[in-house]
Amino acid sequence: MKVFKFGGASVKDAEGVKNLVNVINITGEKDLLVVVSAMGKTTNALETVVSHYFSNPSEIEAAVISVYEYHFEILQGLFPASASEVFADVKELFKELKGFLKRTKSKNHAFVYDQVVSYGELVSTAIVSAYLSEAGIKNTLLDVRSCIATDANYRDANVNWEATQERIGSKVSKKGITITQGFLGAENTNNFTTTLGREGSDYTAAIFAYCLNATSVTIWKDVAGVLNADPRFFTNTTLLHHISYREAIELAFYGASVIHPKTLQPLQRKEIPLYVKSFVSPLDPGTCVGKGVALDPETSCFILKKNQVLISLSSLDFSFMMENHIGDVFKWLHEYKMKVELIQNSAISFSVCVDNKYDTLEPLLAKLRSNFKVKWNEGVTLYTVRHSRPSEIESLVENKTVLLKQESRETVQLVVKE
Ligand code: ADP
Ligand code: ASP
Ligand code: MG
């Protein structure tokens, strides 16, 4: 059996859902586990609902209605009005969501976040499963929360592999077509919904592939495959036909957002190939991540991460930045869930480039200021270039201010103010 994953872009409207069916038909696969993300930008829209819950409750209702109306339009584009069951199912999910928002008095942001944003995937899979049935493709809709067991680290939950393996083994058939939600899990104590981190549906596909010993995973994207740079920011990109697991992990880790970084490790462990293909041209070969050469064709790869923060610390009394200081800094970075992208230190200073994913910069800076002299730049861009030639770096930084540069044999990283 194989695992397919369809992301938000592939199911952003009724045409997208019809195309998903088309892709399944064209590939001719009969034994499939299909992981589906929330439709279009639904997760962002539900994040807005969460922020209203905490700071602007009078806006909640309108925000939920607009998410509902978006899905209602997709339903209308897919089903005749007589298909009342799926309309009722989707309505019921929104009723549940509204009920949660009314009933809950929790101040735990991350907890509320996961309970709310999860409706994006619950609704999308209800629609996709019903549409497949409508199109004559028999399928089972599986609630992923009965399979993926996690800890209670809301918004970035860690998978309990043992429990997950057992549940998937006993609940999921390797025969026929199963539809399930990406991105979600459930914690073990109270079965509350958790999420695996933004863009985590690729990871869900890898978890199922690992536990089911799938022959491959295919993630269907709006690009031809993995390119040597993000086409939104670079022109003249090259399609990478083959990438080794190791190279793919490096690219994803540094921010090539076409593959979620956690996806590769479970696949590598069982040597399950990952295909990245275009949902627009499903018969094209796309990219294969697997065993073999690092990169085919051999080319430099450019990765860009916007909106990073560069923090520079030096000791208050001109003493050295030693292990004890740096140890404290890392402890706080971890506490405030800052993702460290790059570090550099000298005798009396320490610089770190971080991704402020959870909006925790202010409290972190407050903590740091009481121990160090602190300077910082927000809104900087981190460029990572793999296998580059010197001339390429020169043209990359033309007309830009380079705040920090770090170079190793295979990788050049630059923190840049544009
Ligand atoms: P999904 O619909 O699965 O969520 P994403 O939007 O997360 O898909 O991923 C596809 C996008 O990733 C592309 O539209 C592209 O802009 C971006 N991207 C970033 N880096 C790369 C890369 N190296 N190759 C291809 N696409 C990339
Ligand atoms: N819907 C989630 C997100 O937008 C997960 C995913 O798409 O992979 O982050
Ligand atoms: Mg995505």
Image (cartoon, rainbow, N blue to C red):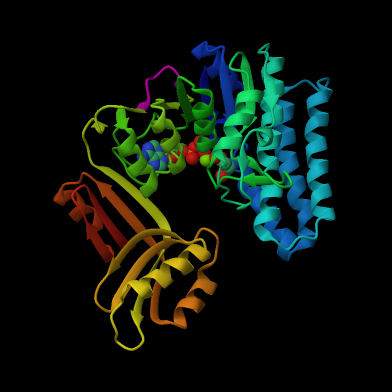
Q: Is residue 179 visible?
A: yes
- Residue 119 among magenta residues: no
Dividing the picture into quadrants, the one containing residue 208 is top right
User: Residue 196: x percent and y percent?
Assistant: 57, 45
Residue farthest along the left direction in this orientation: 390
**Nearer to us in this view, 95 or 352:** 352
Query: Is residue 54 left or right of 3 when viewed as pictured?
Result: right
User: Do we see residue 239 in this rendering?
Assistant: no
Q: Position of residue 131 (x, y in %)?
A: 69, 21
Using the image as rendered, state which of residue 125 and residue 380 is in the foreground: 125
In which quarter of the view is residue 237 placed? Answer: top left
Q: Name the spot of residue 318 as percent of width and height, x first.
A: 29, 86
Q: Is residue 353 above or below residue 230?
A: below
Q: Position of residue 68 (x, y in %)?
A: 75, 41
Quadrant position of the C terminus in the picture: bottom left
Q: Residue at x 62, y 40 (%)?
A: 149
Q: Is residue 137 left or right of 353 when viewed as pictured?
A: right
**Residue at point 82%, 36% (across, down):** 92
Nearer to me, 171 or 306: 171
Q: Quadrant of ligand 1?
A: top left
Please name the predominant secondary structure of the magenta segment in the image: loop
Give the extent of the magenta segment. 281-288
> Taking 176 as reference, is 344 above or below it?
below
Q: Give whichever of 19, 49 is nearer the camera.
A: 49
On whether residue 286 falls in the magenta region, the answer is: yes
Q: Is residue 211 above or below residue 104?
A: above
- x 75%, y 48%: residue: 64
